Amino acid sequence: MGMISYGLEDRVFVVTGGSRGIGLELTKELVNQGAKVAICGRKQEALDAALETIDAGERVIAISAHIAREEDVDKMFNVITAKFKRVDALINNVGMNLLTPDIADTEIAIWQKIMDTNLSGTFLCSRRAARIMRDQKKGKIVSISSIAGRKASPAMGIYGIAKAGVEMLTKVLAAELAQYGIQVNAVAPSMVKTEFSKPFWSSDIIREQIVKGIPLGRIAEPKDVVHPVLFLASDAADFITGQTILVDGGATAI
């Protein structure tokens, strides 16, 4: 895919989970687009390694934070606003899943862990960013959901419930923040070829089964998700809000 310009020069982005997978690919593309980026993650060594691969100097900063902790989120945004003075776009990219038993057999601690990272963290980051953007009278929030939030899947039930919550959070925020010039949307991919999903796509048998359900005949690459996110974060999407774009190779069309 050739270079597509989204007009993001000098825009300030916050990318949660920016040290690997979709978040890292997104950060690299944002740097190519001339944006300034703050990435966060829980492990400092992963953030340091990511910074080495990005090599963007002062335009990228990395902050160690657990987004499900309110105090971590507050500290993170304090650092970002002190450095860059504003926040033009928040990309809620952090996600995690544990393969879970049926709901009837699930421990509350597992439920809480999955909900905290996927939904509560998205809420806390969106809430803090919304306050900054409300004062600016401009901003974009884009969350990474999943088609798992639309269809019950074995061993992914709680993850799917959390992602369905992310999509409703997107609608509620869009309705509440529209009056301040803020657009809030989400992107819901099918499986993406990252370390996160490697247990699935690294198995020939499982991969073949997955690809059978995707009309385009392949598993998504991170770049397939990155470009819809950049579009939603750009001025080209100023009249789109409260929406979730499915990036699934046609999987939900059949």
Image (cartoon, rainbow, N blue to C red):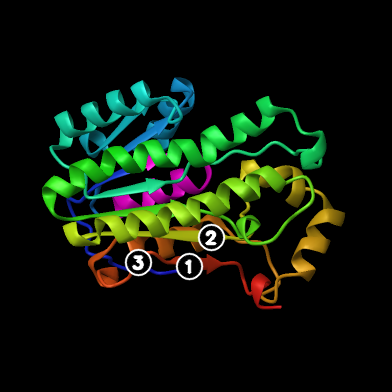
Residue at the spot of label 1? 245
Look at the picture and state if 132 lies above or below 48. below
Look at the picture and state if 187 lies above or below 81. below
Distance from disc 1 to disc 3, alpha carbons, whole Å, reads: 22 Å
Residue 19 magenta-highlighted = yes
The image's mark for residue 135 is none
- First in sequence, mark 2 or 3: give its number: 3
Query: Which residue shows up at 63% across the image and 42% down it?
Result: 196
The residue type indicated by label 2 comes to: Ala
Residue 188 visible in image: yes
Quarter of the image for residue 87 reads top left
Residue 18 visible in image: no
The residue type indicated by label 3 comes to: Met
- In the rendered structure, the answer to whether residue 202 lies left or right of residue 170 reads right
Distance from disc 2 to disc 3, alpha carbons, whole Å, reads: 23 Å
Q: Residues at badges 2 and 1 in contact (C-beta under 8 Å)?
A: yes
Residue at the spot of label 2? 188
- First in sequence, mark 2 or 1: give its number: 2
Q: How many numbered marks, from 0 up?
A: 3
Q: Mark 1: which secondary structure?
A: strand
Q: Mark 3: which secondary structure?
A: loop
The image's mark for residue 3 is 3
Q: Position of residue 146 (x, y in %)?
A: 58, 56
Q: Position of residue 213 (x, y in %)?
A: 76, 70
Q: Is 180 in front, or is 39? A: 180
Query: Which residue shows up at 48% across the image and 60% down it?
Result: 187
- First in sequence, mark 1 or 3: give its number: 3
Q: What's drawn in magenta, residue-wise?
A: 15-32
Q: Residues within 10 Å of mark 2 (few under 14, many from 20)?
A: many
The residue type indicated by label 1 comes to: Ile
Q: Position of residue 4 (x, y in %)?
A: 33, 68
